[in-house]
Amino acid sequence: MINTTMSKKKRPAKQSSNRPNNTNRSGTARDRIAQSRPAPSKRLPPSRAGSQNPPNTLWLYGIHAVTAALHNPDRRKHRFISTPKTAESIEIPQEFIKSIPQLEKLDRVEIDQICGEDTVHQGLALLVSPLEDQYVEDLIERTSSASTSTVVVLDQASDPRNIGAVMRSARAFGADAIIIQDRNSPPETGAMAKAASGALEFIPLIRVTNLARALWALKDAGYWVSGLDGYAETSIDDANISEKSVIVLGAEGTGLRRLTRETCDQTVKIPIDTDAESLNLSNAAAIALYALTRKHRQG
C-alpha cells in the first residue's frame, strides 16, 4: 500500500517548494536525457515450457486488451485465437484485416493451456511483439507545443497489474506518458495489458535507468514536478500546479526514495480519513490525476 497519511515517525525535513537553481544541476539537459536511457533489452517474461511461439513475443488476452492491440498499427501481431462464441462478437474494421493473422477458433481449455489456467482471457488472445521503446526526449518533443501536459512517474513500482491499472487511469485523464525505472520493473506482460484495459496501446511506457535525471530533463522542458507523499504538509488541492505537470508516486509500502523526493519541486499529499491507513498505488494515481487535470481545466 502507498503511504498517503501522516505518521508519528519523524520524516526528514521537506525540501523547499522553490525549484533549485540551474547551478545545482549536473551536466546538460541532453546529457541527462541520454544518461537516463536504459540499455536495449527484450524485457519479456520467460517463455512457457515447450512453447512454440516466435522469440521475443508475448500473449495479450482479454477483450479490451486484445481489441486495442488489433487496432494499433504499431503493434506487430503473430497469432489470433478465440473461442467460437467470442469470435461471433468480434468486429474488426476492414482497414485492419490485412495486418491481422487469420482467426483460429479454439475451445476454452486449449486457450487456458496457451495463456495459463489462472488468466481471465475471456475467450480471446493475441500473440504479439512488444511495442517499440519510447524515450524521454520523444515525449518532450511531442509535448513541446502543447498548452497542458501531464506525466506520471512511478518510483520502483514492481507489480505489473498495478502499473497496468495506473496506465488505465492515465489514459482516462489524458496523461501523455508513464515513466518507470528500468531496473527491477516488470516486463510488458499479458497481466499488465489486461489491467490496463487497452491503455497499453495508447499510453507510452518509458523506461529509464535514472529517474532523477529523467525528472531534471522534464524540469528543463518546463514541467513542474510534484511528489506524492503522505508526510507532506500541502494537500494536492492546494498545491502549486503548472500547465505542464509531473506527478511522482513511490512504491507501495516504501514510498518515494530520498533522491527522488529531493528532485521534486514540491511534495503533496492526498487528504484522507485519519482512521484509514493508506491508498493503494492505482487509487492514489487516479485521485492525483483527477486533481491535476481539474486544475488544468480551471486554468
Image (cartoon, rainbow, N blue to C red):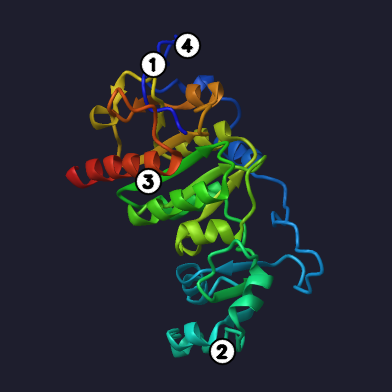
Inter-mark Cα distance, 3 to 1: 22 Å
Inter-mark Cα distance, 2 to 3: 35 Å
Inter-mark Cα distance, 4 to 3: 28 Å
Left or right, 269 with reference to 30? left
Q: Secondary structure at mark 2?
A: loop
Q: Secondary structure at mark 1?
A: loop
Residue under label 4, please give it: 12
Q: Secondary structure at mark 3?
A: strand
Residue under label 2, please give it: 98
Compared with residue 234, is residue 139 higher up or lower down, i.e. above or below?
below
Q: How many marks?
A: 4
The quadrant the C terminus occupies is top left
Amino acid, disc 3 = Thr
Give how far across and how far down residue 88 sits, in percent. 45, 88
Give how far across and how far down residue 291 sits, in percent. 27, 40
Task: Identify the residue at horizontal 57%, vertical 55% (top origin).
Answer: 134
Label 1 or label 2, whichever comes before in sequence order? 1
